[in-house]
Amino acid sequence: MSAQGKESGKMPKHDSKISFYNKNGDEIGVMDFADAYLSFEGNAEESAIEFMEHLSTVFQYRLMLEYNKGYKAGRDFTKNQTSG
């Protein structure tokens, strides 16, 4: 950070971009948070579909992990109740 940034109390700007890619690996959109306003360039519809598919995949994976954890806890609890 420069001395000027410290004196003014402002944080340095970072590259704040999110890029969206299709199944072929081609960039289809870029969302930029660097300025005072959010900007987007590219194919908004295709980017939104890819983003939602990514969120769905992540959510399904987390749901599976939590289900398996709950299933194991229930199985262990039942095993301890029937063996004692």
Image: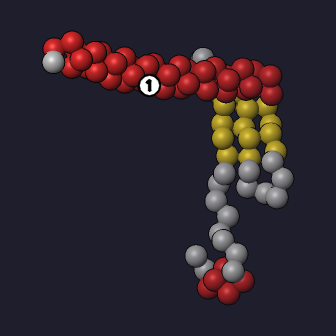
Camera-side residue: 45 or 70?
Answer: 70
| Residue at point 34%, 18% (across, down) | 74
| Residue at point 15%, 18% (across, down) | 84
Residue 34 vs 13, above or below: the answer is above
Residue 83 vs 2, above or below: the answer is above
Please give the residue where the numbered disc 1 appears in the rendered image. Answer: 66
| Residue at point 72%, 38% (across, down) | 30
- Please give left or right for residue 41 compared with residue 26 in the image: right
Give coordinates of residue 70: x percent, y percent.
Answer: 39, 22
Camera-side residue: 30 or 37?
Answer: 37
Camera-side residue: 83 or 11?
Answer: 83
| Residue at point 60%, 21% (across, down) | 56
**How did the renderer colour the structure?**
secondary structure
Q: In the image, what residue type sits under mark 1?
A: Glu
Residue 37 vs 56, above or below: the answer is below
- Please give left or right for residue 45 compared with residue 54 in the image: right
Query: At numbered mark 1, what does the secondary structure look like: helix, strand or loop?
Result: helix
Q: Is residue 76 visible?
A: yes
Camera-side residue: 32 or 57?
Answer: 57
Give coordinates of residue 16: x percent, y percent.
Answer: 66, 51
Give coordinates of residue 22: x percent, y percent.
Answer: 64, 21
Give coordinates of residue 27: x percent, y percent.
Answer: 66, 29
Total marks shown come to: 1
Which residue occupies the extreme front position in the image?
84
